[in-house]
């Protein structure tokens, strides 16, 4: 359980230049299912294999329940990304695997609907979540992993100030195949600016 007092009340929306982030609500189902459904071919190469009931309402209820449980236990916070100019749901971003003690770290994962790609929304969202992790949660290190072929994700992380630290062999099972991933990280006292490759 988080010791920080703000976790005992509703988490406020987080605002960036182009996006607003807030926790998912049960009544977000239709918009979420529509964005995910129309973007399926765009998302599948970069995600765990979709289940046959991936977009069903019952699967959505289980997802929301898991988000709430993770939040209550202090292990993860899921946010939906809304485009500020239109108010439309554009994607999602999660700060997960949150650890305190000697580690003080977390891991960022994200997705965006195909029609919202290339607008800088995800870079803004990653910056907002990173700021929240450092300033509010007092974490020291934020990590992210991406498949080496995912050029868009690499650009997002580097624009958000993350640095490539290495290659994780056969790290995650994505779309049914164990895949290598680049490990990226940002440290709380890293200077602002564009990330660099090592």
Image: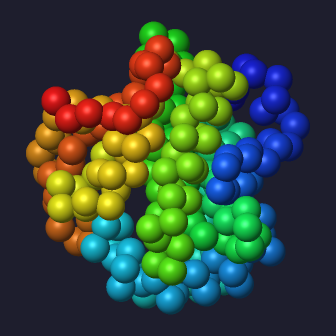
Vertical order, 129 against 112 (above or below): above
Q: What x and y, as percent, mark residue 132?
A: 64, 33
Residue 25: % across, % down = 77, 64
Q: Can see residue 192?
A: yes
Q: Quadrant of the N terminus?
A: top right
Position of 126 compared to 138: left or right?
left
In the rendered image, the vertical position of residue 105 relative to residue 155, given as above or below: above
Look at the image and tell me in which quarter the C terminus lies.
Answer: top left
Relative to 57, say whether 184 is above or below: above
Write the residue at 75% across / 22% down.
Answer: 4
Q: Which residue appears at 71% of the width and 84% of the height?
A: 30
Q: Residue at x 20, y 49 (%)?
A: 181
User: Residue 41 vs residue 135: left or right?
Assistant: left
Which image quadrant for residue 153? bottom left
List x then y, in percent, for residue 33.
Answer: 61, 83
Q: Is residue 54 visible?
A: no
Which residue is rendered at x = 21% and y = 44% of the image? 182
């Amino acid at each position: 359980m988080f010791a920080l007092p703000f976790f005992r009340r509703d988490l406020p929306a987080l605002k960036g230049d182009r996006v607003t982030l807030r926790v998912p609500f049960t009544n977000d189902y239709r918009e979420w299912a529509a964005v995910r459904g129309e973007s399926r071919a765009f998302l599948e190469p970069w995600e765990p294999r979709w289940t046959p009931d991936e977009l069903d309402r019952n699967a959505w209820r289980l997802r929301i329940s898991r988000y709430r449980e993770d939040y209550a236990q202090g292990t993860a916070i899921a946010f939906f990304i809304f485009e500020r100019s239109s108010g439309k749901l554009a994607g999602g971003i999660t700060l997960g695997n949150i650890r305190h003690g000697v580690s003080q770290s977390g891991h960022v994962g994200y997705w965006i609907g195909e029609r919202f790609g290339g607008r800088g929304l995800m870079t803004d969202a990653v910056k907002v979540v990173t700021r929240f992790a450092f300033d509010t949660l007092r974490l020291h290190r934020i990590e992210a992993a991406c498949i080496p072929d995912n050029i868009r994700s690499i650009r997002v992380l580097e624009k958000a100030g993350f640095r490539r630290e290495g290659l994780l062999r056969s790290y995650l099972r994505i779309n049914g195949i164990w895949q290598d991933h680049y490990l990226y990280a940002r440290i709380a006292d890293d200077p602002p600016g564009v990330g660099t490759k090592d």
